[in-house]
Image: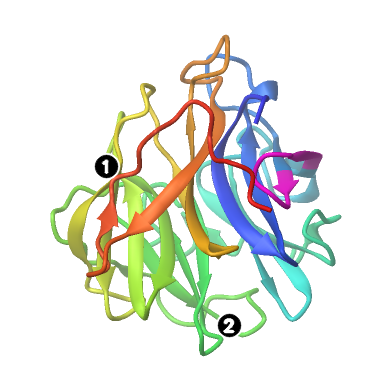
Amino acid sequence: MTQFVADPAAHVFNGRVYVYDTDDQTNGGTYWNSTAWHAFSSANLVDWTDEGSVLTLQAFAYAAKWAAWAPDVVSKDGRYYFFAPIDRWQIGVAVGDTPTGPFTDAIGAPLIQKDRDLNAGDEPIDPAVLIDDDGQAYLYFGTRVPKVVKLTADLLHLDGPIIDMSVSGNNYAEAPWMGKHNGTYYFSYSTGWPGQIAYATSASPLGPFAFQGIVLDYVGISTNHASVVENFKGKSYLFYHNAKLPGGGDYRRSINVDELHYNANGAITQVVQTTQGVACVP
């Protein structure tokens, strides 16, 4: 992608890959202070449509409107739910009828708020949502201590307490992502600033999770953030950001995609970072 965007949350909706991201094009250049979220979509992972700004902090009346960080979007019953970290201390949820909105604030209040919710953590950011095969939704988030909480069936409220996740190795920093492959839950995350993308596995979406290895090595900047698309036209892919575009850096990041491979025993082979991305997927 030929713009400064970062923190990719990639999903397949209606046979098309959508990547939701933070907008480094519009930040101040010395901090991650953009106020909007961007999206791209593709049917073949080579030809990308710029969907533009799909949501801004202005949609949330309670936002201080200075930091739109790594989001996630999921689909349920024909609607699309945009989970937005707002101003570093709260997570909102907006809803729309298409993958690119328009999205509107769904509940008029934060879904999670640092000073309101027990065990929300020091920095409730980086939301990632898994809707399991039985329909139960789980929200993962947080820095330094990974958090998980069940969501109600409408995805608009918490359904139980926020709990700390158990991940062996104790190297979690931020950027959680949860996937499922052949019945096993794969929890990936960044290990620090700078960090690698590590992964851990469990038989349960709530863990405990056992550290397995590194999915993605350092990317040459202070942050590392990735997401996985499973089985798009027969292959899996890792979306991540780096600073490979001309003028790139810590606050001018860009998104790349490379293939992700599982071994016969379910282990992930460390992704080889390329400069050209992947070949066209017909």
Q: Is residue 184 above or below residue 165?
A: below
Q: Which residue is mark 2?
A: 152
- In this rendering, the count of numbered labels is 2
Q: Nearer the viewer, residue 161 or 47?
A: 47
Residue 190 placement, left or right of 170: right
Asked whether residue 228 is in view, the answer is no
Which residue does the numbered mark 1 point to in the structure image? 191
Range of residues picked out in magenta: 40-53
Q: Name the amino acid type tagged 2.
A: Thr
The residue at the point 40 percent across, 31 percent down is 223
Q: Position of residue 54 (x, y in %)?
A: 79, 46
Q: Is residue 90 left or right of residue 75?
A: left
Residue 29 in percent (x, y) is at 58, 14
Q: Give the spatial CA distance, label 2 vs label 1.
A: 30 Å
Image vertical order of residue 49 relative to residue 83, above or below: above
Residue 215 lies in the magenta stretch: no
Picture coordinates of residue 278 (x, y %)? 54, 40
Query: Does 163 sit above or below residue 229?
Result: below
SS at circle 2 = loop
